[in-house]
Image (cartoon, coloured by chain):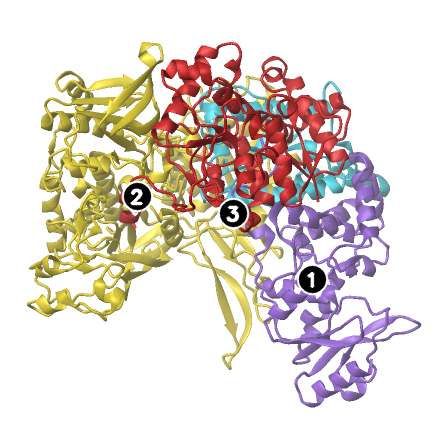
Chain colours: A red, B purple, C yellow, D cyan
Amino acid sequence: MKIGFYPGCSMKGGAREYQESVVALAKVFDIELVEIPDWNCCGATAAHNLNKELSLSLPARIMALAEKEGITDIVVPCAACYNRLSVTKHELAEDASLCSKVTGIIDLKYSGKTNILNIIQFIDKYITDKLEEKVVKPFNYNTACYYGCLLVRPHAILNFDRVEDPQSMDVLVKKSGGNAIDWAFKTECCGAGMSVSRTDTVARLSGDILKDASDRKAEVMVVACPMCHSNLDMRRPEINKYLDEKISMPVLYISQVLGLAVGLDAKTLGLNRHMTEVILPDKPVKNAEPAEVSKKVANPEKMEA
Amino acid sequence: MNELINKVTKLLNDKTIDAFIGYGQGSTDRVRAIFARTVEQASKLIYTPACTFNLSGYLLKHEVKHLGKLGILANVAALRSIMQLASEFQIKDGEVYILFVNDDASLTEFSDFQSIEAFLEKANIDITPDEKARIEKIEAMSVSERWEFWNKEFEKCIKCYACRAACPMCYCHRCTTDVNQPQWIPVASHERGNLDYHLMRAMHLAGRCINCGECANACPMDIPLNLLTYQLIDPIKTGFGATAGMKADAVYALSTFKPDDKENFII
Amino acid sequence: MSRIGVFVCHCGENISATVNCEKVAQISKELKGVEFSTDYKYMCSDPGQTMLKEAIKEHKLDGVVVAACSPRMHEPTFRKACSEAGLNPYLCEMSNIREHCSWVHPKDDLTTEKAEDLVRVMVEKVKKNKALNSIKVPVTKTALVIGGGVAGIQAALDIANCGHKVVMVEKQPSIGGHMSQLSETFPTLDCSQCILTPRMVEIAQHPNITLYTYAEVEKVDGFIGNFKITVRKKSKSLDEHLCTGCGLCTTKCPQKKIPNEFERGLGFRPAIYVPFPQAVPNKPVIDRENCTYYIKGKCKVCEIVCPTKAIRFDQEDELVEIEAGAIVLATGFDVLKSDFFPEYGYGKYKDVIDGLQFERLASASGPTMGEIRRPSDGQIPKKIVFVACAGSRDPAKGIEYCSKICCMYTAKHAMLYKHKVHDGTPYVFYMDIRAGGKMYEEFVRRAIVEDETQYIRGRVSTIYEKNGKLIVKGADTLMGAEPVEIEADMVVLATAGVANHGAEALAQTVHVSYDAYKFFAEAHPKLKPVETNTAGIFLAGACQAPKDIPESVAAASGAAVKVAALFSNDELTREPLIAVVNRQAPPVFSSCVGCFLCQSVCPYQAIEREEIKNRNGEVIKTLAKVNEGLCQGCGTCVALCRTKAIDIHGYSNQQVYTEVMALLND
Amino acid sequence: MQDFEPKIVAFVCNWCTYAGADLTGTSRTKYAANVKIIRFPCTGRIDFMILMKAFENGADGIIVSGCHPNDCHYSTGNFHARRRWIVFRNLMNFTGIDTERILFSWVSAAEGFKWADVVNNTVAKIREMGPYENYNKIAVSTLLKEEVSNHE
C-alpha cells in the first residue's frame, strides 16, 4: 500500500525531527510513505487571508498530484497543512462551479476522493491496532496532550475528535504506556502565527499552557503541530522570563512518543534537535493506569433513566 | 439435463409439485417455456445455453397459478423476480419449489427465501457492459437529441403490450393503461399515447425492475425499453441504497424515504 | 347533464377592483352544465348566502361553485349554506379569485381571463364531485395521560373534573416530575412542593383517575376516539395493596450508597426506596439493579422487617390494556448530558453542577437541608458563578433554540444563594436576559438590585480547576469584550432543556411527529398549539418545547379542554375526504393486487389488510383497506398506487385530471 | 416570440404552498397571471402522471410545490414526494423531457414573497425558453388539429 506524504515547509525546516520521527515510526510498522512529487506550499497563514482562489488552488494542486500518483491516503503531519487541505477538499465538494474554476487554474484532474489524514488519523488507521504489541519501552510519564487549534477546528469540516476536550492523543499516549493527565489548556491558543512578530504574546499564551501542565505534574508535553511545537519549545527563554520560573518540561511530537515506546532511539527520532533538552529519566514500569481526577462524581444521566 | 429431468420426475411423482415451469424445445431452433404436469412432459425439459429467459413471469399468471403447487427452473433474474414478488406479498415462502442450474450443471434447490437472499448477495446482478454503454450513449446526448431518439423509438410502438405481458413485475389485474375513468393513457398508438405508456411503465417499475430484459426481448418493434428502467437502477441504488429483488422483506424504495434524501433541484 | 350554479363574489371591491365580475359570471353561464350564474357584492354575507340557498332550490342545482376568496377562508361557510339548502356540502367548490387573482394581478383583461379560467376549472371539477357523508366514529370517554409531572397532573385533574375517566401513566415510582425537585419557584419564591403536593394527592384520590406509576406505554393502536394502549407496569417487587407505606424497609435496607436520582446524585438512597418523602404513591419499589438480593441471591432484609409481608421478589412486569378516546402527552423535558460540556468540566469537576442540582441544594428537604454547600468538600461557596445559556442558543452545539426558563431560574438561584449566603457573591454570565412574563422582569431586577448579583454579559469559554478553585474564563462584552477570569468556589450551569430521553421512541410508538430537537410537534404553532397532527393526541407542557410552570399548566388545561370537547359527544364527526380502495364484483373484487407498497407510505398506519374469503373460509384474495378513522386524507398512497385502485375523495383522480384538462383546454 | 404568454400550471399542497400563495394575495404582492394553481391535499398526492398530462395538454411550464421537509401537515408526504420527483426527474431527463421546464420548490405558508418570486422567475424563464414545441408537437390540440385536417 502506497501512502502519500505531504511534508509542507516546516518538515523541511524547523520541524525536521517531526518528519524523521513519522517516517521512522511508519517504517517500524512496515509502512512506506511516498512524498508527493513536486508538492507546493499549502497556502497556510497567508493565502487564505488574501485570495480565496489561490488558497484553494494550492491545496487542490497537491491533492491532484497525489491522485495522479494513484495515492488515496495522504498523511499531513502539520496541523496547519492538514487544515488547509481538508478545508479545500470540503469547499470544492460543496461548490461544483468553484471546483471547476479551481481545476481550471491548476490544470490538473481533481476528483476530491483523496483522504486527508492528520498524524493521529494516520496512526489510528494504520498503526493503533498493532501498537500495543510493539511497545517495548512503555512511555510511563505524566503526559499533557496539547492539541492546539488547527487540528480539531472547525469541527463541521474536519469532523475529528471533540472540539473542546479532544481525546485522541490521550488514547495513543495511554496505549504507549503513558499517563495522559487531565488538564485545562488542551486547545488554548499557543500564540501560533505571532511566533516571530509578537514574542511577548507567545510567551504569555504558551507560558500559561506550560504552567498549567507543569502545575498538574506533567513531565512531558505532546503535540501534533510544528507551530505549537516551536512556540512551546523554542520560546522557552521568553516563557520562563514571563512566568518568572524555569520550566524544563520537554515538548515532544506524538510520533516521537510512539517511537520511543516501540524502541526507537533518540537520535533516529530527532530528539536532539529540540531547543528544550529532552531529559526523560528511566522509570520503573508501573502506574500505567491513568489516574482520573474526581472519579467519584455521580453520573446524572443514569439518574434519569 | 438428466439430473433435472430426474429431479422433476421425482417431484411430480411424490406430489411435491403439481407442475414445473422449465425450458423446452420450441419451433425452429427457439427455446420456449413448458409447463410439465406429467412425467412424460417432464422428459421434454431441456437446459441449453439458449435457456436464458426469465420464467418467473409465469408464476402469477392466472392460467399457471391454477395448475396447483408450482416448481420452477430459475436463473438469477428469476430468483430476483421471486424476491421482489415476495416483498410485494405475491409469493409466500415455500409456496414455489425453486431449482437452479449451477455452472457445473449440478442442481441447487432453494428451500427458503433466506437461502435465495444469501445466494443473490454473491451473484452478479449488474446490467451488461453493452447495456451500460447504450445508456451512457443516450445520456451523452443533448436533451433534444434524447427527445428525438426516444420519439423515434416510441413512434414504432404498436401498443401490443407484449412488454407488459413479459414483465414479471407487471402482474396487476388492471393496468393503468386499462383505466378509462379518467383515460390516463390514450388508447391509440400515436406518439403521445406511446410516450405516456412507456413513461408510466418505467415509473411503475422504478425501484422494482430486476433487469431481466424480458420487456425488450418481447418487443416486436425492437424498442430498447429495458434501458428506461435500467437507467433508474443506479440512481435508486446510490441515492436510496435500494436494489430491487434482493430481499423478500425489502421495503420498496419509493414507499419509504430518508429525511436527508439528497437532491439538488428543489428551491 | 349537470345543473351547476356559479356565484361570483365582488368581495366589496377586493375582487371587483381588478376583475370584471359581471363578465366572469356571464362567461361562466355559457359553460356546459352551468344552469345558473350570478355575481354579488358579498357572497359570504347573510343576503349572499340566502341568494345561494334560494338559487339551489329554485334551479334544482346539483353543484355549486363560489368564485370568491380562498377556500381556506370560507369553504366551510358555503358548504354549510349548501347543506342547509339540501345540497350535499361536498358538491360545493370554491374558485380562489381573490388571493390567487384579484389581489396579485393588475386590473386588465388577463386578470379577468384568469378568473374565468379558475371558475371553469372548478365547474369541471364539481361535475366529478361526489356526495359524501361525514364519517362518524364512536368515542371511548377515557383519556390517557402520559407523564405525571405538573402538566400531566393538571391535564388529568381538569379532565377528571369534567366527569371523564383518566388513566395516568408515569415512568418513575412517583408522580411529581421535575417540579417536585424544585426548591422555590419564580417569580413569587413560593415553595414548589407546597403548591404541588396537594395536587399530587388529589390525583391519587380522585375517583375518576387510575394511576399507574413505574409504568411505561409500550404500544398504541387505533385512532381518535378509539385508541388501544398497552402499558407495561414494571414490577415494584411489592404488593401495593398490602404495603402501608410505613417505610421500615427503606430504613433497614443494607444497601445505602446508591446515588439518589431525585437528588440528582447529590445524596444517596437504599435499594428499596421511595423517591422522596411526599411521593405519591408513598410506597417503595425495589431497584433490582442495585438490590443485594437480586445481585447476590441473598439478603431479603426488607421482606423480614415488613410488618405486612408485602415484599414480592418474584413479582413480574404486568401488561395492562387500556381503551381510551384521547391521549395527552405530558412527558416533560430532560437536562443536558454532562459530556456536552467538556470545556466546562461538567461531569468532571464535582463543584460544576447543573441548575436542577442547585435546586436540590437549595431545597429544605435536600441533601444539605437547604444550605448551599458545595458537593466536593461541603464548604459554603463564597463566590458562585451561574452560566446561563449553557448549551442553549448555540448552533455549534446543535441547540439553536432558547431554553426559555433559564434566565428566570438563574436569577432565582442567585437570589436564593444570596438569601442564604449573605457575604457571598453571585455572578451570572448571560447572553441576553429574557424575562418576558408577568412579574418576571421585576424579579430579575430584584436579583440585580436588591441581591447584588453581578451580571456579566458574555459567554464562558472554559472552566478549569486550579488549586481548589474553579477558574471561569469568559468575556465581558459590555466592557469592550475584556477577558474576565473569576476564581469561583462553585459553578452552576443553566443547562439547556432538551427533549426527554426516549421522546423519539415514544413519538414513534404513539405516532406523533416531532421536531429536529425531538420535541413533540404541535399541529399549528399558533392556532393549534396543544394539538398534534394525529387526531385525538394532545400535548401538555415541556414535552413540546421548554416551558415554565405557568405555561405548562396553561397548556395542560388547554389540552384538557380539547379532550373534554372531544368527549362531549358520543360520536365524533370527521370530514370524509379520505382515501378508499375501489371494490368491484367478484371474482375481481378490486383492482387492488395486494402488493401493499402503499402500506409503508401511509403516515397514519391507516392501510390494513382485508382478506376476501370464499364460502369455505379460504382466503382467495388479500386487498388493501383504508381505515376510515385513521386516514387523514393526504393521498400519498393514491399517487403511488400503480393500478389506481386507491383513490381519494375530494381530490380524486377524476377530479384532478379534469381540472388539468379544463385549465389547459379553454 | 414577443407575444408569447406561457401557460404554466402549478401543483401545490393545501397546507403550505396554497396557504403561502394566499399570503401573497393578502400581502398584495404582484406576480404574473400566467400561473394557475391546482390544489392538492399534499405533495404526496401529486401523481407523476398528472405532470405528463399537463405537458401534453399544452403547458409550457410546471411548478410543483409543497411544505419544506419536516413541515408536512401529514408529517411525511413531502418526503415521499421528493423521492418520486428525484426518480421521475431522472426518467424525464433520460427521455429528453426538458426538466428545466418543471420547477420544484418548497414554499411554506409564511413564504408569500417566495411564492411571488417562484412564479415570476418561472414565468420569466419559460418566456425566454419559448413554447414547449417538442411536446406541443405531440400535444392533444395539435394531434386533434391534424386529425381534423386529415378528415377534411
Report the front residue among A23 and C303: A23
Kind of element beneath mark 1: helix
User: Which residue is labeled 3 in the image?
Assistant: C129
* Residue B102 against residue B238 in the figure, above or below: below
Kind of element beneath mark 2: loop
Under mark 3, the amino acid is Asn
* Residue A239 against residue C633 in the figure, above or below: above
The quarter holding residue A214 reads top left
Q: Which residue reaches farthest right?
A: B28
The quarter holding residue C70 reads top left
Give coordinates of residue C505: x percent, y percent.
39, 51
Q: Residue at x 73, y 51 (%)?
A: B229
Chain of the residue where label 1 is placed in the rendered structure: B
Report the front residue among C574 and B216: B216
Under mark 2, the amino acid is Lys
Cα gap from disc 2 to disc 3, whole angstroms: 72 Å
Give coordinates of residue B122: x percent, y percent.
69, 62
Determine contact: label 1, label 2, CB under 8 Å: no
User: Which residue is labeled 1 in the image?
Assistant: B122
User: Which residue is labeled 2 in the image?
Assistant: A295
Give coordinates of residue D93: x percent, y percent.
72, 39
